[in-house]
Amino acid sequence: MKPDLGIKEKDLTEINDLLNHVLADGNVLYIKLRKFHWNLSGDNFMELHKLFEEQYDAVAEAIDEVAERISTLGGVAIGTTTEFAELSLLIENPGKIPTNQEMIKELVNDHEAIVKSLRKFVDDTEEKYGDKGTSDFLTGLMQAHEKMAWKLRKYFKGS
């Protein structure tokens, strides 16, 4: 049974496509946070270990909520690493273990890229597709990524 939510079927399809991009970004970021968590060493090891764990737990929860939002709107959530890699705007660096500072910088950049993407999607879902529910949902995600980026940026002087 298709949902009857006051949004045209064509628009629901577009919204679900957009949400699958959000889902892909979340999964690539989650995998990167796990990799960095496992491979930390040196200064601030335990502090960063806990911070990365806090962030990958938050991202994992958000991933589930995005997938459920897709289902709520009658769509199908992607679920393979191939699909995540194809749809994500984030870049992975296989075989490379950055320094702690490089990890932090890369994660800040990834969170900020997601924020910029979400900012556009917030506007599109409300203005273009008339879906205030998804717009509100994405606003919450955007705020969470802004806060995670802020916590990481604080590891750099002058931020």
Image: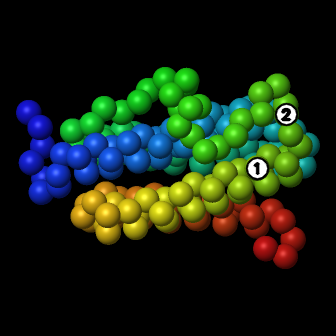
User: What amino acid does circle 2 point to?
Assistant: Ile
In the rendered image, is residue 57 in sight? no
Q: Is residue 32 left or right of residue 3?
A: right
| Sequence-first disc among 2 and 1 | 2
Between residues 59 and 106, which one lies in front from this camera angle? 106
Which residue appears at 17% of the width and 52% of the height? Answer: 8
Q: Is residue 141 above or below residue 52?
A: below
Residue 74's spot in the image, x, y percent?
Answer: 21, 39
Residue labelled with disc 1: 106
Mark 1: few/some/many CA within 10 Å (<14, 14-19, 20+): some
In the rendered image, is residue 28 in sight? yes
Residue 39's spot in the image, x, y percent?
Answer: 80, 33
Colour scheme: rainbow
Rendered image: mark on residue 136: none
> Is label 1 in a helix, a strand or a loop?
helix
Q: Is residue 42 left or right of residue 117?
A: right
> Is label 2 in a helix, a strand or a loop?
loop
Residue labelled with disc 2: 97
Residue 106's spot in the image, x, y percent?
Answer: 76, 50
Q: Is residue 74 left or right of residue 42?
A: left
| Quadrant that contains the N terminus | top left
Snapshot quadrant of residue 77: top left
